[in-house]
Each structure stands twice: as C-alpha cells, then as structure tokens.
Image (cartoon, coloured by chain):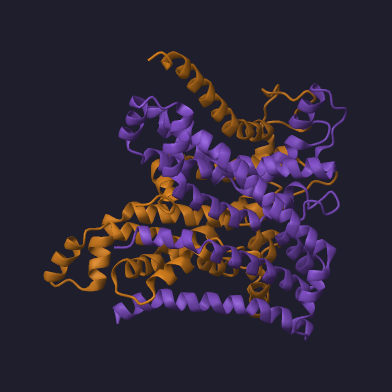
Amino acid sequence: MRRRKGSRVGLAVATALVVIFLVAPLYWLFVGSLQTGDGIAAVPPQLVPADPTLENYVQAFGQHRFGRYILNSIVVSATATAVVLGLGIFAGYALARMPIRGKTPILMGLLMISVFPVIAVVAPLYLMLLKLNWLNSYQGLIVPYVAFNLPFAIWILRNHFLDVPVALEESARIDGASNLRIVTKIIVPTVLPGIFTAGVFCFSACWQEFLMAISFNSSISSRTIPVGVALFSGEYTVPYGKLFAGSVAAVAPIMILVFAFRKTVASGLAAGAVKG
Amino acid sequence: MVIAAVTGFPLIFAVVMSVSNVKVGGGGFDFSGLTLDNFEIVFKSEKWRYALAFTTFYTVVTVLAELVLGVLIALVVERLGASRGWMLGLLLIPWSLITVISATLWRYVYAAGYGVASWALTLVGFDDPVILGNSTSAIAALMVADVWKTTPFVAIIALAGLVSIPKELYEAAEVDGSSGWRTFWSITLPLIRSALLTAVLFRVLQAFGLFDLPFVLTGGGPGSSTTSLAMLGYNTMFTNLRFGPGAAIAVSTALIVTLGCLAFTRVFRAQVGSREG
C-alpha cells in the first residue's frame, strides 16, 4: 500500500510519455498540412499554426492529382482484399478441418511466405508483367498483392475456424447440408470477426505497399498513394504542405477505421503470437 | 469435387509460389546468358558487402530497441485498466500509417534549417546540424523513424502476452515479498517469451527487407551509407537496368532470409503446434 501513490503518479507520467511518443509526429503531419511556405519553414517551428489554411488540400486534389492516387489505391486494395478473402476462407477452412497430409509444413510455409522480402520476387514479376503488358495496370498489382497477402489471411482465418465447435457442423451435416452450404451458412457467420480481421490486414498491407507499386506502376495515372507521395516533388523545394495535405486525406479514413475496430485488429495482430 | 477444390487450393498456391521463386534465378540467368557470374560480381562488390553489413546492423539495433521500448509500453498500458482500449487504438495508428508518408514526415522533421529535430539540436548547442548529411546521424535518424513506426507492433503483441498472465501469480509473488524487478524477470518475462519471440522474428524479417524508409528519407545516402540490400537490388535493377546482378542480389537476400527462417523453424513450429488439435 505504501507504494501506491508514488506508482500512480509514475503511471500517469509514463502514460503521458507514451501518448506523446505516439501522437506528436502525427500532430506535426496535421499541422504541416495546414500551413503554407512561410509557416512550414518557420524557425523556431510553430507548434500551433499562426495562419492555418486549407489551401494545401485544394491544391493536392486539384493540380496534384491526389484524388487519382487515392482512387487507384482503393481499386487495387479493395479488389485484392475481396479476392484474398474469397480464396482464404476456403483454404483456411480446409486447413482447419480437413485431413490433409503435410499440414504442418504447409502452415509453416504460409507463415514464412507472409514475411518474405518482396525484393526477391520483384525482378521476375516485372518481367512477367512486361510480357503480359500489365505494367501500369490495376491487375498488375492486384495479382501479386493477392499472392503476398493470401498466406497470412489463411493463417488468421484458420485460427478462427479452429475455434468453431465441431458439433455445430456435425449437426448441420446430419441435417443433410453440403460442405459448401456448411461453410457459407454456418461457418462464415460464426467467424465473421476473423474475416474482418483478415480483411483489415490485407487492405492495410495493400494500402501501404511500396516496392512493387513503384516498380510496376510508376506512370502518373496508375500511381497508388505511396508511389504518388514518394515521387511527388516541387520545382525547387519539397512542397511539404501539399504533400501532408494529400497524406492526411489518404490515411485519415484508414486510421479512423482502425481506431474504431481497435480491439478486433489488435487481437488479430496478437493471434499469430500468443499461444492459444 | 468441392472438397478437392478446397483441399487442393493451398497446395496449388504453394506450387505457384515456388515457381515464382525459381524464376528469380531464371530471370538472372536469362539476361546474362551465364550461370554464376552474376553472383560472383555481387559477392565481390564492396557495395553489396556494405549493404549486407548495414542491413544486418540496422536490423539488430532497431529490433532490440523496439523490443525494449515495446515491452516498456506494454507494461504501462497493461496497468491502465479501463482506458486500455484507447491506448490500443493509439498504438495502432503508427502501425496503420503508410511507411512512405511516415518517411516523408520524418524527412521534414530532420530537414536542415527548419526541421523540428534540427531546431531542437541547435537549442542544445549544435551549430547548423545537417542530420541527414552525415552518415552516422543519418543512420541514427533512420533508426528513430523506424522505431517510432514499428514499436507499437511489438507493444501490442507484448500486451497480449501480459494480459494472458494469471493475476494469481503476481499475488503469490507479492505475498512472497518479491521485488517488482524480480517479479518482472522471473515471472513476467518468461511468460511472455514466446509471444516476444514471434514478434521479434516477424520484425527481423521485415527489417531485413528494409526499402521504403531509406528510399524516401535518405535516398540511400549520404553516399551509400544507408543503402539497404533491397535498395541496392532495386537500384541495380531499375536505375542501372542491370537485371542480372540485381536478381543475384535479390536471390542472395532471399537465401539469407530463408536460412534465417529455417534457423527459427522452432518458433514457427511452436506457432503451428500451439493451435494444433
């Protein structure tokens, strides 16, 4: 009991430090997006913008085509996520329930592929896409994104399928339901949180992916957000204000989504790491 | 038939992946018309050796820093009780930020003259610091940016481990008069070890593929002091258009990672095993 008061103050201080550590850079991104030339380069830096303006947002979406980058990212990420979930649900179910030989190596392989460095496959993929004439196209990014994100999605989904009681399935089977019907009508609704988690992960990974995107889709009209930001430059100086405005617009929806569903997302992150 | 499609799918997928890996070698050979020359060029090159050393050093330092900070943050958040959910949300925000955007933001923070970090350094007595203009400070700057973005990932996993520790163990330790420090080393740490191991493994593999951050933040410079293996491979292939040596760099990186994975097979197996049956 003697330590209680001291440790409570300590905890508050520590919490404040953690919050500052996490939030300060993001605050700076936001402040930067509200300032034009003088404010951006002010010395000493202005912690609260003296003359906030939305001009950067107007220009980012007007002359700098951030709208196009965001649209490209949405098309690529959403399609890839839909395909990954469609395939992952069946594969995850199979790995959780069906008697397959060599299950352990398959699962280990899946986990390893999901963290494999992209650089290893960029060259052959580039040549393949070149042959197919798929460079600077949506499908040229969607297909590799599916391949790279499917393993982890299968992994998450399988873990959720394992938690569905087998008795539920058996009673459906006794009632004469087919495998497909069991999956779509019984299993999928019960593992909806798992599907959601896998979806968020896949979408967020596609949204952030850079190496493949810059290698395959670098023409202005096919750039995704990361490529657009990385290749964005002014004539003389880096136009941070406009860059940040476009960036805030690009990441805010995802952040709000992740924040709203924080419990599900965090448990999904931890699912691979904590012994069930 | 449905069963065949369902069970066959993962197998087909594994085959497809192995084919695309084989083609990495194929791409290299096709372009040069020679077999092992590309690898010889790469292994003898100073740049490759430096990139390998830099990537390894970078990986070790950042992952260690993330591990220590991540556990500390998890310990703080775990004690918060009711407001834990909020902190969880905050932790997820850097994780969900696009790396390229985070790199751009840090470039602004480090900017010579008007960057916040440069300004802060002048306050403590440095004259006109050029953080990204000097190898040592550029590497440190890169590490700070990486640690900020990825520590939350480690913290979330460590937190999940902490939450799963039964409270009785702590009570028993308190009754036995164990000090906080001692409780941490002999109860907390051993019990979250397996969770941390997985987090470390994932982070090591990711850090080894380092690309986005130096591409935007330092451009691999000054000189080539922050050129990672992935950046060297990318530059060789797409800037210098030397696909042969580029593919050789890529393949050698992949080999190193695969060997790393195999060395950690136990961790992966433990993951699979823990959910089996």
Left or right: A174, with B181 as reference point: left
Percent across and percent down for residue B183 are 43, 32
Question: Could you tell me which residue is drawn at 21 percent across and 73 percent down?
Answer: A178
Percent across and percent down for residue B31 are 76, 81
Relative vertical location of residue A10 with respect to residue A145 in this rendering, above or below: above
Quadrant into which the N terminus of chain A falls: top left
Can residue B227 be spotted in the picture? yes
Most foreground residue, A130 or A94: A94
Question: Could you tell me which residue is drawn at 85 percent across and 42 percent down?
Answer: B133
Output the letter for the chain in purple. Answer: B
Percent across and percent down for residue A202 are 48, 57
Q: Quadrant of residue B206?
A: bottom right
Most foreground residue, A92 or A30: A92
Percent across and percent down for residue B55 are 71, 55
Most foreground residue, B62 or A67: B62
Q: Quadrant of residue B227?
A: bottom right
Left or right: B238, with A165 as reference point: right
Numbered label tally: 0
Q: Farthest residue toward the right?
A: B127
Q: Farthest residue toward the left?
A: A175
Question: What hue represents chain A?
Answer: orange
Most foreground residue, A135 or A91: A91
Left or right: A11, with A229 as reference point: left
Q: Farthest residue toward the bottom?
A: B33
Can residue B87 be spotted in the picture? no
